[in-house]
Amino acid sequence: MLAGLRSDVTPAQLARAAVEGVVCNLLAGADALGPETADGSVFLIGGAARSAAYRRVVADLTGRPVVVPAEDELVAAGAAVQAAAVHHGRDVAQVAEAWGLGRGETVEPDGTVDRSAIRSVYADTVARAPE
């Protein structure tokens, strides 16, 4: 749904708004799971993680650094780390650190973006949308 579209909106603004809608929807789903308890970085994986625009919007709307891990096979690497941690009686984070996992490109949030306002407009628009 397009809402609030004006004649002076640029293609770049429209593209960013589309990505913001996707990210706001994901964050609304995360909010529904309960209060936020995690601190620190957000790890972004999957096809969308390849998009610089998506990485930027996730960082801006979460207000957290976004890390895109350099590893290609994260599911397999995660399973191997868990198995090694159990086998050696070590913490998963220790094994991942020892293997040099979890490093990659980091996108810092833009502190000038009003993430609360963007998410509020998104929530209001969704609430007014016909079913």
Image (cartoon, rainbow, N blue to C red):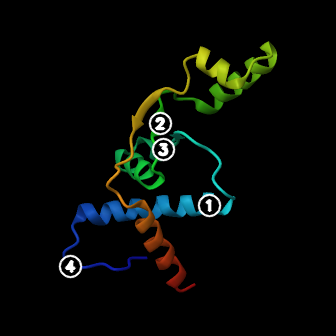
Name the N-terminal-most of marks 4 and 3.
4
Contact between labelled residues 2 and 4, with CB atoms less than 8 Å apart: no
Instruction: Give, as a three-letter code, the residue at label 4.
Output: Ser
Residue drawn 61% across the image and 14% down it: 98
Mark 4–mark 1 CB contact (< 8 Å):
no
Cα separation between marks 4 and 1:
33 Å
Residue 31: give its label.
Answer: 1
Q: Would you name the residue on which mark 3 appears?
A: 47
Measuring 69% from the left and 59% from the top, which residue is drawn there? 34
Q: Earlier in the sequence, mark 1 or mark 3?
A: 1
Q: Looking at the rendered structure, which numbered label has been put on residue 106? A: none
Q: CA distance from mark 3 to mark 2?
A: 14 Å
Alpha-carbon neighbours of circle 3 within 10 Å: few (<14), some, or many (≥20)? few
Q: In this figure, which residue is indicated by the disc labeled 4?
A: 7
Q: Is 59 in front, or is 48?
A: 59
**Alpha-carbon span between mark 4 and mark 2:** 36 Å
Where does residue 7 sit, x and y in percent of width and height?
Answer: 20, 79
Crowding near the residue tagged with mark 4, few <14, some 14–19, many ≥20 C-alpha atoms within 10 Å: few
Type of amino acid under label 2? Val
Q: Is residue 35 above or below residue 122?
A: above
Picture layout, residue 5 above or below residue 80: below
Q: Is the Cβ of the residue at disc 2 closer than 8 Å to that at disc 1?
A: no
